[in-house]
Amino acid sequence: MAKTEFDEFVAKDVNAQKGVSIPVKAGFLERAFVKKMACSKLHPNAEDEFTFDTVGPSYKIIGEYEQQFRRAISTGQEVFDEPLIVEKLQPDGYLILNGHHRWAAAMRVGIKKVPVKIVNQASESDIQKILENSKHDKRVALDLDEVIFRPDDYPHLEKALGFPRNLKYKQRIRLGTPALFYYLAKNGYDIWVYAHEYYSIDDIRGFFKGYSVYVDGIITGIGKKQKAEMESAKRMEKMISSKYAETVHIDNNMIIVTRGRAGDFEEYELTGPEEEWAKNVITVLGEIDQNGKEK
């Protein structure tokens, strides 16, 4: 397709999905593996700048991918380094969350199928249900990618999940994370985890279930959302923050506690050896709770 033809194709596809398609949850087997999907089954995201009239696709990026794909095809190499991230739609097809330009390049090169990873994302209605069912007025917020998930060569890792969970869940977590989550739940905190990458919320919940702990809220892909999607993310975060009188942000070296709508906050430094991170967090939170009771 030429540039103008592809622009028209994208606009027509977005318009065809409007008022017809809605995101739905994909089953376990659908999410379990990367699979090849026909490009015609994938739909551009109306909330992504790729589809905006004022922004649109970057044909420079698409062109670079086209050259990369043609080289890979001519040398017999794997065309895609990583799958596109998509969300299942009803009545048919999948919404592209990440990988629009690779999808466009594949279409222009003539590649019929591309690898995709299907994920389930939290919607505003999902968040609302979690908040309505919660009996707590305080929460903890943790970053999965920056704080909880650790590389395989990190020296202080929790024991890996056993078979068969280890076949699906490859992530490793910081030593003491399950004990920390257990403490938080026992002491009246809702646990909210955030991730820059796209993970399926069901997979994250299943992963932590393998460690016998529960996560209340899961929001992923925050580092990859486009402008329109960020507006939805802001609305969700506003719903969450207005529910709780106290929010505790736990980082690698710091705990920040915010209280009330005024946003008053207190900072607490985490000291001590890396392997005792979870223990240090529990100690500081215990002191914070005790100080709150004495006031």
Image: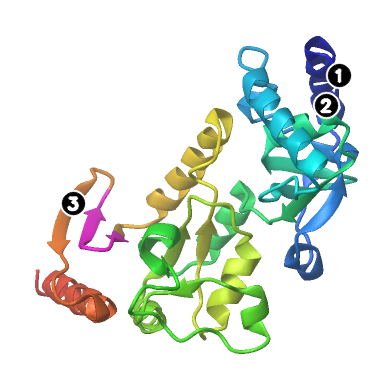
Instruction: Give the quarter of the image for residue 163.
Output: bottom right
Distance of mark 1 from mark 2, alpha carbons? 6 Å
Above/below status of 40 relative to 162: above
User: In the structure shown, which secondary structural element does the residue marked by tag 1 occupy?
Assistant: loop
Q: At label 3, which amino acid type do we have?
A: Phe
Q: Can residue 282 be seen in the rendering of this structure? A: no
Horizontal and vertical percent position of residue 49: 61, 25
Looking at the rendered image, the disc whose residue lies closer to the viewer, 3 or 2, is: 2
| Magenta residue check for 258 | yes
Horizontal and vertical percent position of residue 41: 88, 42
- Res. 1 mark: 1
Left or right: 65, with 76 as reference point: left
Instruction: Give the quarter of the image for residue 18.
Output: top right
Q: Which residue is mark 3?
A: 265
Q: Which residue is mark 2?
A: 108
The residue carrying pointer 2 sits among few (fewer than 14), some (14 to 19) or many (20 or more) residues within 10 Å by Cα, namely some
Q: Residue at x 75, y 60 (%)?
A: 34
Q: Are marks 3 and 2 in contact (CB under 8 Å)?
A: no
Give the magenta range: 248-260
Distance of mark 1 from mark 3, alpha carbons? 54 Å
Q: At label 1, which amino acid type do we have?
A: Met
Q: Are marks 1 and 2 in contact (CB under 8 Å)?
A: yes
Left or right: 68, with 228 as reference point: right
